[in-house]
Image (tube, rainbow, N blue to C red):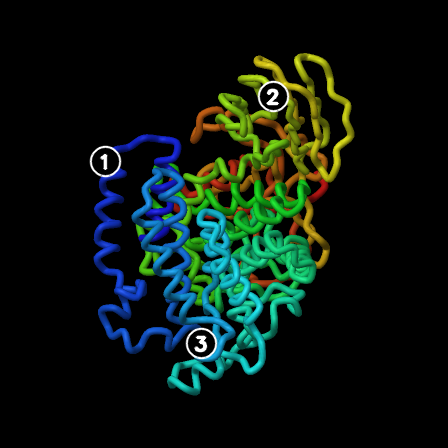
Amino acid sequence: MAKWLEAVGYTLAWHEDSDLESTADQAIEIIEKAQREDGYLDTYYIINGLEKRWTNLADNHELYCAGHMIEAGVAYYEGTGKKKLLTIVQRLADCIDRTFGAKSGKIHAYPGHEIIEMALVRLYHVTGEERYLNLAAYFINERGRSPLYFAEEQKKNGNTFYWKDSLFQYQYYQAGKPVREQDVAEGHAVRAVYLYSGMTALAKEIQDESLLKAVKRLWTDVTKRQMYITGAIGSSEYGEAFTFGYDLPNAEIYGETCASIGLVFWARRMLEEELDSDYADVMERALYNGCVSGMSMDGKRFFYVNPLEINPEACKKDQRKTHVAIERQKWFGCACCPPNLARMIASVGNYACSVGEKLAAFHLYIGGEVVLPFDDVRILVDSKIPWSGNVCLTMQGTAEYTFALRIPGWCGKYRVCLNGEEVCNEPKKGYIFIEREFKNGDQVQIEFEMIPRKNYAHPSVREDLGKVALSRGPLIYCLEEIDNGSGITRMFLGRDSEIREIQGILEEEEIDLEVTGRQFRIDEWDNSLYRFERPNEYEEKVLKYIPYYLWNNRGVGEMAVWMHEIDI
């Protein structure tokens, strides 16, 4: 509910919709009536007994739900100017602030599922109330300290510790040790990146160097050792969790949609702290692949899990893969992913560009309009990405200002021009800076080389050794059975084969890829399960690739991102 309200707030900020706004306002009226006099707002405990509240912070999501409601209150206020929901969430935050903290008489605890940390930083930005920032700092700094609160809570209230037989123990909640001592991403992936997002936002706000060093270490571990090529994270179904470096199974992956969305949240906050294209590259990769793959083209069906390889029979008969759905679902019992996608997509403008008093940094080249902090000064963005690499920024108004233009990691060659004259400035941490007095009608034209490329995984990634994945621009590609027939795992990509671009059929301007390969023949294999002779019966086959995010929009079938590569 809170995620949906947040998405409505973002939507109404750029698109008037009186019916949608009326529906949201009616929902907010109900929420206001449900709120207790002390500001408490969690209908599970309001219905089932307020005396039980705050008795299972590890697992019962009270602070998590509060965090989402706070995010909704801020977004709805910023999108509509209406304060009712903002007032509700302030009362809720005040209730939490009176309940938790270091002072005697308060509960010395933190949430089992993080998000309230970054929500409180946002509430501080809107209200200017430092107590919200201090509360966010308390939740982050208290986490993992001895004596461990969740262990004490279980003893006191008789709560079940669901992970007592696990390898990660309390690191499932990222609570096994203080956050500044955590070097490796562990436990539930969504919880983790939500925590890291809050840590980054707080570190920037209060200039906490030790906290910033911790998030940079964790960023390196996640993005250099535990992230799929699609931007998916969380390789294990058990605990929906990280495992260890380079353990990235393609068919048994968890790769929750919400985890990729959380990675986008984190990347944006890292960019706010430091303008470095490494963060934007990850943000773009996750957004175009690991996030939007979670939704069907018509917006009515969703994936919770986003595999990089699928065999429908295995998902029905192999217990290790039963968590992998062979097609998108209409809804889920735990429906966190669909409204998370809604708020992500509705707020994408906040990720495309960062605007300050003196600088606009373009992270994602998405068509739209950027409003600058001057009267009636805007930048019109005309972008053909992801299908071609042409971008044009047109100034409307006059201002002395700086543009920071990201050069994507997938781009080998590029050309930047100002009013037709080439700009030869060297990139700084992946951004080209143009500082000048921009006049009305000035144009910055950018041409990014966008060609098909082969991608190889680190040799320590056992699942992908000897395999190759194809990409073009920000998009990762895959093969589907509907285009290539069955037996995709018996198909091989030619090492020196030309990768050809062809017109796709699912999206407007879609570019698909085609390459000559081979497929093992099995029709002449005898009845033996094993034999001494090396199999050498191939048939030539033209392999067709589509963008990964579009898979499973034409029915159920096999799919794979990574393919073996051989000499032809």
Residue at 69%, 44% (x, y): give it.
Answer: 566
Question: Sequence order check: which comes first, mark 1 or mark 3?
Answer: 1
At 58% from the left and 27% from the top, the residue drawn is 501
Tell me which amino acid carries mark 3: Ile
The numbered mark at residue 107 is 3
Q: Quadrant of the C terminus?
A: top right
Q: Would residue 391 be found to the left or right of residue 435 on screen?
A: left
Classify mark 1: helix, strand or loop.
helix
Please tell me whether residue 206 is drawn above or below residue 142 in the rendered image: above
From mark 1 to mark 2, how far is it between C-alphas? 38 Å
Q: Position of residue 241 (x, y in %)?
A: 53, 64
**Element type where label 3 sits in the image:** loop
Residue at left offset 27%, top offset 38%: 21
Which label sits on residue 529? none
Q: Which of marks 2 and 1 precedes in the sequence?
A: 1
Question: Label 2: few (<14), some or many (≥20) within 10 Å?
Answer: some
Neighbour tally class for label 3: few under 14, some 14-19, many 20 plus, Cα within 10 Å: some
